[in-house]
Amino acid sequence: MQTLTMKFGGTSVGSLEAIKNVIQITQREIGSGNRVVLVVSAMSGVTDTLLSSIQLALGGDKWGYLSVAEKLRERHHDTIKRLINAGDARDKLSATVNKLLDEYVELCHAISILGEATPRIRDAITAFGERLSARVIATALAQNGINAKPYDASEFVITDNNYQSALPLWDITEAKIREKLLPVIQSGITPVITGFIGATPDGAWTTLGRGGSDYSGAIFAAYTHSDELIIWTDVDGVMTTDPRIDKRARVLPYVSYQEVGELAYYGAKVLHPKTVQPILNLKMPLRVRNTFNPDHPGTLITSESQRSSTIIKAVTAIRSVSMLTVSGKGMIGVPGMAGRAFLATANAGANILMISQSSSEQSMCFVVTDDKAEAARMGVETEFRAEIAAQNVDSVEIMPDIVIVTVVGSGMRGTPGIAGRVFTVLGDEQINVLAIAQGSSECSISFIVNEHDLERAVTLLHDLALEAVPI
Ligand code: ADP
Ligand code: ASP
Ligand code: MG
């Protein structure tokens, strides 16, 4: 008997048809004698809707957030009515959904009255999406003969209080899962657990970051000692590029943890960047599969990179980023400049996505998300106040409207000429490259281009991923 942790994303639980597939997939695994742990996202679009209601409440738009709450109520009740037969189970579920949504409206009122939404209350609000969907899905599974029960991940995933991007406290989380969840699984129950959310040790709701249900799936897979983690989504697997950018994207049958880590970090939305962390050392196989095409084998992700016919496996892009440039003659040979700039950036709450420094050390640039660019700029300028006054450092420039494009493939390691090939392709098409960085793992090359070149750059490089260049 195997234990499988299966995570279903927003689209996979976002409609009646999708949930019916979830039921069939779960029945099939249980029918084959496997134990199943389910981790679910909110129905597609619900997290965005909840976030928008926070804005409405902040602006005092009571009618606005009440009508959002009504729409959420309608959507969930409509799904319930079409999915669950009339009777006690349906009545109980409907009452639970109403109670949760009433609680949610209370929190919106509080925001509206105070005119303030603390990070803590934001997480309490966004947690409702998964709290609702887990209950709907567990009841639907139970109606179909599966001994399923809903659980809030706040019972198990204990985190720090870094709201919106909370980090699990590993020891407590492991202990909670061992003490409270493993006995549930061993007793034959199929738990349906909320993805995305956790709680601080004193019980405040937290969330793991947008798209974080994949990460939740990996946490549960690791600590329930699952044999495999399956991420069920709306595409056939990890693809050579985002199919929304280039329709020719193909499914990659095999990818390594390292490659998928780079892909996810540099913008492939199909997996949250932290997903591989909890399962990496366990060498647990990770599969990405399509809820809407369950017979497709999907992508198998393991510690080994194997059986690829191309050196560049995939191309990704990150939008909505800005490049900060620090330059000045006084930077040459002065130790610690980069360290100070990065620390100031981190203190401004910005995560650095990419760094590039010219060999003369006259300038250094790094990339952060748009929303943090101004804070980072101010932080770095403050840090270098003395150097700027002495004209050793010029002011810190922000370049907006740029994107990071990344090519990924472990076959690049030790294969000379890949970077040359990449930049020749771009140069031939007059695409201006503003900065370049190669990971020390040599598994990826990232570079900055203007936003308006994104589609062209990705498509041209995607040609290289589609070409069968033998390794
Ligand atoms: P879920 O709701 O199941 O978590 P997401 O929307 O978060 O699904 O992620 C799946 C989407 O990721 C796909 O629909 C696809 O558009 C996008 N995507 C971006 N890059 C890739 C890639 N390299 N391979 C597969 N999908 C990708
Ligand atoms: N519902 C959350 C989000 O939309 C988490 C997830 O779907 O992974 O970000
Ligand atoms: Mg996702």
Image: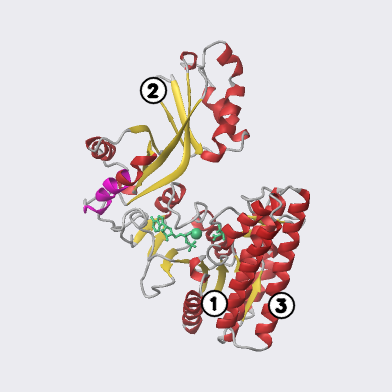
Residue 458 on the magenta segment: yes
User: Residue 139's spot in the image, x, y percent?
Assistant: 62, 80
Q: Which residue is mark 1?
A: 35
Region in magenta: 457-468
Q: Earlier in the sequence, mark 3 or mark 1?
A: 1
| 116 or 281, nearer to the observer | 116
Label 2 vs 1, first from the N-terminus:
1
Determine if residue 349 is in view.
yes
Helix, strand or loop for disc 2? loop
Residue at mark 2: C-beta within 8 A of ligand 1: no
Q: To which residue does mark 3 refer?
A: 95
Q: Quadrant of residue 357?
A: top left
Residue beneath label 2, please?
A: 359
Q: Nearer the viewer, mark 3 or mark 1?
A: 3
Give the residue displayed 43% in from the left and 37% down from the top: 401
Does the magenta stretch mainly form a helix, a strand or a loop? helix
**Mark-to-mark CA distance, 3 and 1:** 30 Å
The residue drawn where x is 71% and y is 69% is 100
**Quadrant location of ligand 2?**
bottom right
Count neighbours of disc 1 (C-alpha within 10 A) and say few if under 14, some if 14 to 19, many if 20 or more: many
Residue 332 position (above or below residue 15)? above
What type is the residue that disc 2 sits on?
Ser
